[in-house]
Image: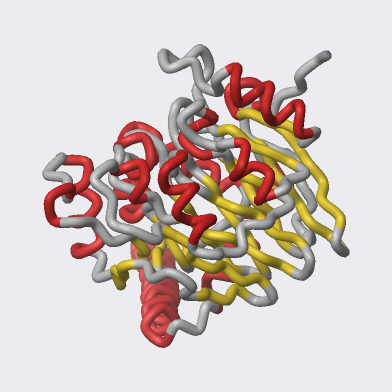
Amino acid sequence: MAKRKTYKKYKKNKTISTSAIVLTAIFVSFFALRAVDEWLSLGLFAKFDAMVVQWTKQVTNQKPPVSFDPNADFSVHFIDVGQGDCTLILSDGHAILIDAGENDKGDDILAYLDDIGVQKIDLMIATHPHSDHIGGLDTVIQGISVKEVLMPPLKSSVVPTTKTYTDLLTAVKEKNITLKQSKVLEEYRFGNGKLTVLGPVANYDELNNTSLVARFDYGELSVLLTGDMEADAERDLLASGASVSADVLKLGHHGSSTSTSDAFLQAVGPRICIAECGEANEYGHPHEEIIERVSSYGAAFYRTDLYGHIVLSAKDGALDVSTQKQVSG
């Protein structure tokens, strides 16, 4: 009996040991294949990860923060980060992230990206080095793959020495990300979408006016993104002959009266205007003057302080607007 018992125990342990070896081999092979996939930039595991995320959301009934058509030709997400800017463009499987709010908003943005299944950023734009625009970018860089970062040229006399700015540069360097200085009229292709750098067209002492200005075009639809560009830079941009006409205008400087002059609004001719601003912010953005100007012009007006996240989806040339919150009246 003793020998038989010992034999059974030995066989059981041998089975457990073999299973452990097999499982270890599977895990090692899995991570080895993942490493090779990342090294060769095949993207196979990115698709696998996206499938796992989608399956998990279906099982847990998790819904994205804003309901929008995932099969749209492209979508533009004005992410509510309080008093700051953060815009995401999705175009034919590519992702462009423009700004990321204050320093404490990086994790919120990563959560948003995860909720809608974004696995990597093809182009990250830091419009200008104010903390309410670039504060969360270093956290985003640490949490998701970023291919390239684009920043506007700055005069040496206005290059910031703030920790927020140096943290961004440090994160870019640590992750070995390509960092480029923007050039006017430079184009970036994302499937059928195209992003064109329009400004700044001059060297400015005011950081708001150094904002990288870009227009995104997809078919006949276009979106103009202006950072915190103010009236002086708007005037110079118009004088340069730049094509600023767009269906959607992201208002400069959170809807401040220092931006979106009447001449600029007329030149853009938007159907929809967006103000990215915080609820009950101390600056009073968007200013009443701008609200009235947009209203008198006849454009639809959406603002993140009231609507939360705002998503514009385009399908077959038509624009659909979805918002996180409903506003009555």
Does residue 118 appear anywhere in the picture?
A: yes
Query: What is the count of numbered marks?
Result: 0
Picture quarter containing residue 304?
A: top right
- Answer yes or no: is residue 7 visible: no
- Closer-to-camera residue (84/43): 84
215 over 293 or under it: above or below: below
Q: Where does the C terminus fall, quadrant-wise?
A: top right
In this rendering, position of residue 205 left or right of residue 80:
left
Query: Looking at the image, which is closer to me, 323 or 48?
Result: 323
Residue drawn at x 50%, y 58% is: 239
Q: Residue at x 55, y 23 (%)?
A: 286
Residue 80 in picture, x, y percent from top left: 55, 33
The answer to whether 152 is drawn above or below residue 285 in the figure is below
Q: Position of residue 247 (x, y in %)?
A: 74, 52
Q: Quadrant of the N terminus?
A: bottom left
Residue furthest bottom in the image: 40
Name the spot of residue 23 as percent of width and height, x first: 43, 70
Q: Quadrant of residue 21?
A: bottom left
Vertical comparison of 32 with 315: above or below:
below
238 relative to 103 in the view: left or right: right
Pick whichever, 140 or 297, lies toward us.
Answer: 297
Q: Up-down: is 114 above or below 34?
A: above
